Image (cartoon, rainbow, N blue to C red):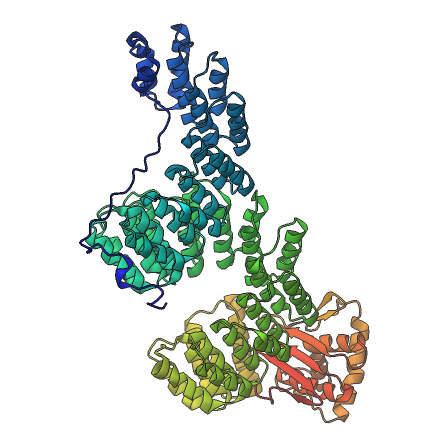
Amino acid sequence: MSSQLLPVTPLLSITNTKTPSPPISTKLPSPPTTFHQLSQRSHIPSHVYKHPSAILLELCISMRELHQIFPHIIKNGLYNEHLFQTKLVSLFCKYGSPIEAARVFDSVGDKLDVFYHTLLKGYAKNSSLGDAISFFCRMKHDAVAPVVYNFTYLLKACGDNADLRRGREIHGSLITNGFATNLFAMTGVVNLYAKCRQIDDAYKMFDRMPERDLVSWNTIVAAYAQNGLAKRALELVIRMQEEGQRPDSITLVTVLPAVADFGSLLIGKSIHAYVIRASFDSLVNISTALLDMYSKCGSVGTARSIFNKMNHKTVVSWNSMIGAYAQNEDPEEAMVIFQKMLDEGIEPTNVTIMEALHACADLGDLEQGKFVHKLLDQLNLGYDVSVVNSLISMYSKCKRVDIAAKLFRVLKGKTVVSWNAMILGFAQNGRVSEALSHFCEMQSQNIKPDSFTMVSVIPALAELSVTRQAKWIHGLVVRKCFDKNVFVMTALVDMYAKCGAVHTARKLFDMMDDRHVTTWNSMIDGYGTNGLGKAAVELFNEMKKGIIKPNDITFLCVISACSHSGLVEDGRRYFASMKEDYGLEPAMDHYGAMVDLLGRAGQLNEAWDFIQKMPMEPGITVFGAMLGACRIHKNVELGEKAADKIFELNPVEGGYHVLLANIYSTASLWDKVAKVRTTMERKGLKKTPGCSLVDLRNQIHTFYSGSTSHPQSKRIYTYLETLGDEIKAAGYVPDTNSIHDVEDDVKEQLLNSHSEKLAIAFGLLNTTPGTTIHIRKNLRVCGDCHNATKYISLVTGREIIVRDMHRFHHFKNGTCSCGDYW
């Protein structure tokens, strides 16, 4: 931010020797409410206002007590006294029952003006806006002259209901009744337009005020701050000082969130200095606003320091500190603060619960999440929509989307946030069909999707990897005018890349006026997974020349791209550049990517040495990359070492055992293959069955290896026999090395029943010549299927795009985009 536009030093200054003019009193005149006030105005005898019933009314503090006192007033013949009637109207309004107040009002014969003013206040505060306006019209009909606070109450009610039309009518009535220059009335008008998001009108009214007090200034500052115009709010704080008004605690509590939104830590520190000089630092609301500002400006350590020094902490203070850690990617510390709060006997609120659930979701800690859910029940905090939305997100991120779905089904008053949370939950857990069905149901219920909805549903479609569906959602984005939203467009770039349409993804990328770091990451990763490593490197180098700096995800994407394309030296250089040029510490995933890079290139010994020199204990992903490389290059010795390390970490699925068994089978070590399979049976581990999907005419067809359940199975297997002869004639040789204990012709039959071959055959049989076949597989494409698909693309003249669990393979004219490097 330019210091010329918003100078930092004079933002909040109290060193000026000129004494500012005292603020005009902002205490709004109000109807008389105590018996002493009423008796003085109405000349009521002392025996009436000193009656025990009058004393009881004066001491009444609840509706329950009022209902107990009311019969005594009637019994003692005091009901018809104006004094008691006025007090009853006032108390019924105060305790939220304008209906009972109206009954008392209607029973009064000769009504004083004070009755009208009191009941109007009750309607404005505790009834509908329509009731308040109707009663105001009755006042006019009964020739009761309005007073200034009639308008302030009505203006506030219009603002709270965001009813601009009625608010303008009240504003007009205010002017015709001679209050256009009244300080209290015009402050109410400013507040009305601010709450109705008519900021220009609010400022016009403020600027026309002949005099302004501190409340007026605070109102206009809040108008800009609460409507997302942080810079203007800060400029007004400077101007109010120039005009002799010193900011008070309300000004600071109003402006600090604006500083957080503006992201200016320097200005925040300037305000903090003013707080200390003005001795406001002992106020709990100021300290809470400061720690919230520091946390949102990324200075969580300073926020914690303020929190620790607070002598008195409210539940809002605790909530802000928990939220500070939860929002700044330190969920562990957020839960530490949450537990400390409970230990100190501070009762959580719904906001506390939501912040704690956010932390549990980020941790993926189901047990702690269930504890927080149970606490919600124990404290009887209720299940408002925002809390249930947080529960849905927590259970979804903790892989219990079934519980999230149950909560969603029984939730009443679902908001767009509720739908977004559920759609994202299904998408994150691989339940794409449910995500899409909920998206369609949401629209059928006239819930308009927002940008967050699109960012939730687009990744679900990306997992389907169906270009037709991708085009459909892209069209919807354009029709809903989300095509200028950087996050929605980034999701589209990622989706097209995951559908194999990497050139379309790049067109969208180039069309974007604004790009986030995630946009660059998505495009770089898209090139990498589609086997275009050189293009990924070129784009990364282009990114480095711009103003957006690479982050840790960027480096993971580009190193992985180098790994998939054999660009070993480039990958080495980028790994070193992370820390040397950008100060980024490599994480476990970066080390795993480097092992994959070296291993795929056949540099297995160097990869193993790299693991031994890691500054952290290698995780399962690192050793998994090593084991995969050993399978590619048939290295039994290092494969066994990597597998031993993996098995020490107790993997919960059998994929790594299968990899080791494949290494042994390639080396014809059948006894060891049998031993691995026996171990899997003993541990209850199962191999994930191969599954391939193909989309045809709006229907997803699923094929499992060896399955015969598809209606066209007989036709598919017959066609595969003919196709097998054709590709053999073109040079294909089946790779049967991984199969033993059966005859050679049976081995070929087993290879022919692999899921991707069944899906490809189905696609060829049911599409016209020249149509590209799109296949999605849940596992890595096996070597034989990869080789066979190259020959199938050659003899059929078709392009076949296969997306496996790691990358894309674009087969065309007998070659693959991966260059046989996968």
Residue at the left extreme, as displayed: 17
* Residue 626 visible in the current orientation: no
- Quadrant containing the N terminus is bottom left
Which residue is drawn at the image coordinates 41% and 86% (left, top)?
608
Which residue is drawn at the image coordinates 17% and 54% (left, top)?
17
On screen, residue 248 versus residue 666, left or right, reads left
On screen, residue 566 versus residue 323, left or right, reads right
Decide which of 103, 587 is in the foreground and name it.
Answer: 103
* Residue 112 visible in the current orientation: yes
Which residue is drawn at the image coordinates 32% and 15% (left, top)?
39
Q: Position of residue 558 (x, y in %)?
A: 48, 81
- Quadrant containing the C terminus is bottom right
Q: Is residue 180 above or below residue 470?
A: above
Decide which of 748, 709 is in the foreground and name it.
Answer: 709
Which residue is drawn at the image coordinates 49% and 20% (left, top)?
102
Q: Position of residue 726 (x, y in %)?
A: 78, 89
Q: Position of residue 601 (x, y in %)?
A: 50, 90
Q: Is residue 31 above or below residue 371?
A: above
Tally the numbered discs: 0
Q: Quadrant of residue 693?
A: bottom right
Q: Is residue 622 above or below residue 373?
A: below
Q: Position of residue 304 (x, y in %)?
A: 27, 57
